[in-house]
Amino acid sequence: RLERCVSIVTALTNGLSEREANDALNAHICKGSPQHEEICLGLFTLVLTEPAQAQKCYRDLALVSRDGMNIVLNKINHILMEKYLKLQDTCRTQLVWLLRELVKNGVLGADGVCMTFMKQIAGGDVTAKNIWLAENVLEILTEQREWVLKSSLLIAMAVYTYLRLIVDHHGTAQLQGLRQKEVEFCISLLRERFMDCFMIGRDLVRLLQNVARIPEFELLWKDIIHNPQVLSAQFTGVLQLLQSRTSRKFLACRLTPDMETKLLFMTSRVRFGQQKRYQDWFQRQYLSTPDSQSLRCDLIRYICGVVHPSNEVLSSDILPRWAIIGWLLTTCTSNVAASNAKLALFYDWLFFSPEKDSIMNIEPAILVMHHSMKPHPAITATLLDFMCRIIPNFYPPLEAHVRQGVFNSLTHIVEKRVLAHLAPLFDNPKLDKELRAMLREKFPEFCSSPSPPIEVKIEEPVSMEMENHMAEKDDSCYDNAEAAFSDDEEDLNNKGKKREFRFHPIKEAIVEEPVDITPFLDQLDESLKDKVLQLQKGSDTEAQCEVMQEIVDQVLEEDFDSEQLSGLASCLQELFKAHFRGEVLPEEITEESLEESVGKPLYLIFRNLCQMQEDNSGFSLLLDLLSELYQKQPKIGYHLLYYLRASKAAAGKMSLYECFAQATQLGDLHTCLMMDMKACQEDDVRLLCYLTPSIYTEFPDETLRSGELLNMIVAVIDSFQLQELVCHVMMGNLVMFRKDSVLNILIQSLDWETFEQYCTWQLFLAHSIPLETIIPILQHLKYKDHPEALSCLLLQLRREKPSEEMVKMVLSRPCHPEDQFTTSILRHWCIKHDDLLAEHIKSLLIKNNSLPRKRQSLRSSSSKLAQLTLEQILEHLDNLRLNLSNTKQNFFSQTPILQALQHVQASCDEAHKMKFSDLFSLAEDYEDSSSKPPKSRRKAPTVSPRSRKSTAQPPNPEEESGSSSASEEEDTKPKPPKRKRKGSSAVGSDSD
Amino acid sequence: MSTETLVKDVKPGLKNLNLILIVLETGRVTKTKDGHEVRTCKVADKSGSINISVWDDVGNLIQPGDIIRLTKGYASVFKGCLTLYTGRGGDLQKIGEFCMVYSEVPNFSEPNPEYAAQQSQSKGAQNESTPPPPPPDEPRPPRAPPGGRITRSQPGHPPLSNGKETRRSSKR
């Protein structure tokens, strides 16, 4: 279009004197505004393309333009924003020349063009072209300083741009020279027009910090800190600046339009998980040189401050902002850049105020810490560390403000539910001890769980650290903090520390919280009371065990008053509290460690029970004692399970648990088991996995049907634990699924989380249950809602030889254009088992050859939901045909298929014939050797399906017997009776 | 313009294909006997990925991340893999970069034994050892230089790119 404008202009002016040319142009312009535009753009293009004529063309342009060059300015901006990277060098030079002219002439709007130009100067890029641009624009701004001073936005933008660019310009003499000019330019504007620069906001401070070593800026800093009024009467000091939010236009101005487009594309279109290549491309283009490291800060600031996705995007699977930040942080190659990047990330935290600042600015930092905890704990650790250290170090005189800012941020994050609790982040066992201690010290408020202490589940309490702190009594917050975790048991280092604990459990428990058992003691008689007190005083495990044995003996004595059981249980529960919060399973599982772990005093009750006969009167008494304990301390349930599994003395006594369950108030094995496993799941996942094989083996009736139990397990295990369970299954130690219940459980699992479902399928696949058993699940699976199950099933089906039941189930899936399941598996079978598949399809086609939905088949259990219609089969086949077209796969040229198609075609109505004409046309040419006219009564298909039916269809006995008997009766046409072909078409074909 | 084929619909033997693709990987260069440089690039659109065979200088200009438009391409099976080629009078043009959503799977150029079998069946007199196999019924002199050219802004062009992408300089 621009070329056309040029040709118009050239045509008008060619060969004319200047004056005449001018008149000609004016005359043309007078014709209307389209002509005006043509001329303006034509002249503009000439300016850019013909340096020799530029001067003259610009003059003409200035003379003829009737809109103050508006059209031209718009065009310049447009070219700069969209095409700058593609412009030729001459053209760029001319554009800059034009800018200079525009500025010189003070054209209204030239400041906007100036800012667009500055945006083209890429950060972190010291290639010649970029430097050239930075130099030239700076030259214009310096030359036309008076003009610059007229626009405060331009001042601020220019200062922001060049302050940032100074950082990149060092090294060579040329760059040093440029840098000096930039420094002078910025300093003069900052000193003269500080309040205009103030408009930038807190990021001005960030940039000034990066250049603070330069002598001129050092002086400026002195004034900012000690003498702010020198800069402006309204300026009260650096705090004022730090508290004002940076406007988005400044954060955005340091990215070139191309970078901006690409980042925005990533945050609005690219799906999470697909970002790798885009990141690589971006990195290759913009972040691959050492000089480009400074750009990371600009990008991070841009993402935090400018990219604020809509809720719609936030809730979708689009690449989240934190993931991009994580990428920018992890790919940082220099330490300086890394620490600047972290500062950029946290910059809005430091002086955060919920009234002025946006949650969106602080959200990426917390989320990147949160989400990196699992995959890259080191990232989280370094960010948390930075967050702690920045408080005193950012600017010591303002430490209180920074602390408040970070606090406000954290509070706001919790309030806005970005994260519900911070404790899992701050006191995560994946972080090292010092860091956690520092976090605890700095943010005690956020380290504790908000739940009331009663509910507190303490499963990994007393570590070495705690022992050390014990004397100082400052452990309360720590204790609570630990309690907030239920999902991080996997940390082994931490476990290691806790081993210490088991050796002196009592002492610590007592020191920790001196328990008052006196009210309970009063319920006991003298001798029992003595023993309990002895137990309380006892210091080592062995002595306690002895006392405990004496207590048990006393309970078992003839004259023991069973009224005391409750009081005794309370005492024991209080005294052995530590047992229930300590680790049950030793860190390393060896025979000795297991034996040692079952040597706890409380376990003496279990041991005594194991040694007794069930009919012993003491047996039930001890069970009553346990039942009392169970009421007060439900954890004893899984402790019992553990004991029965781990102790050699209890080998083969798992049934004891059943007696226990019946003795409890729950009174029922299933409920009791589920409650105990649930408690165990909440407290200790390792233990849960340890117990899983034995409870599945010992209580198959309770466990194998329980989707609830399975869900408990898969909801908390990690991939390592999954692997362990899979191995157990394959080694024959564990059976988690049985043929009769597996289908039901898998159906239940469809509502679970993705990972839970994958675990379930993995565990299922570890068993060798024939896939046939679970095929009916297909009826429950929706392509969109159950991707986990469908893809697992698909991958399993492809390893199977198709049986008729499988084919039937697969074909029974409703046809939906987006659902590719059926076509996928059919295609696979076509390739591997074409003859088998052909036979099955033929038989199904013929069986279901009744088009109207006569579904009298709501009878047999397996086919209840599989409402297979002919139409469905044909539709699937048609899809398959389309998929196979061009592959030369000759599935559809197999005799059985052709026979079946012909057969079906003969009996179906016109609408369907039309609809599947392509499909039927495949069979058109086919002529069966044994029966020439397809309409003949003695059709060939009648022979083969029957003979096959009697052999190849065991899965469907009911239908089978029906059809085969029918076919025997009506020798030559076995199909009609099968599906009660009432349709006239059937009659027609028969009578033909 | 609205007639772009999707990668998933590319089948061997199809001709006159127009596709818009994003370049994922550029492969190594191999030389044919008569000195042409050929490279295989992995490209994709939202429906999946496929290999494209790029000839001579064009290959040097293509970079991962480029969005290219293939006009008058054809698809054929090379060494058992479905592959795209620029057909006669066809063209490979860079129309943008980066901003295109793609899906890397399914990869339609995964070796497909079926194709291989077919190919060996239909193998005629042609020497199949060098790419590209000619389109089934568009006779081309064997190993003719490809028709396509990719152009980036190069010196010697009209200096202003006028809002549109740079154009091919030489059409055949």
Image (cartoon, rainbow, N blue to C red):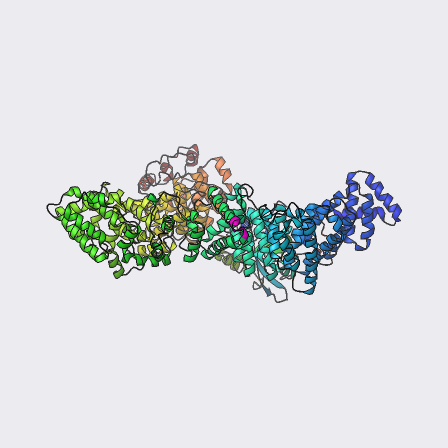
Which residue is pictured at 54% across the width and 52% down the height? A397
Residue A626 magenta-highlighted: no
Residue A401 magenta-highlighted: yes
Residue B138 lies, with reference to residue A945, above or below; the image says below
Which residue is pictured at 79% across the width and 44% down the height? A39
x and y, in percent, of residue B112 in the image: 49, 56
Q: Nearer the viewer, residue A199 or A460?
A: A199
Count all numbered tags in the image, as a single digit.
0
- Looking at the image, residue A648 sits to the left or right of residue A285; the answer is left
Confirm whether residue A770 shows in the render.
yes
Which residue is pictured at 80% across the width and 43% down the height? A65
Confirm whether residue B164 shows in the render.
no
- Looking at the image, residue A173 sits to the left or right of residue A583; the answer is right
x and y, in percent, of residue A317 in the image: 50, 46
The residue range painted magenta reads A397-402
Q: Nearer the viewer, residue B9 or A448?
A: A448
**From the image, which quarter does the C terminus of chain A lie in?**
top left
Q: Nearer the viewer, residue A589 or A701?
A: A589
Q: Nearer the viewer, residue A190 or B10?
A: A190
Most prominent secondary structure in the magenta stretch? helix
Residue A661 falls in image quadrant: top left
Residue A870 falls in image quadrant: top left
- Looking at the image, residue A767 sits to the left or right of residue B51; the answer is left
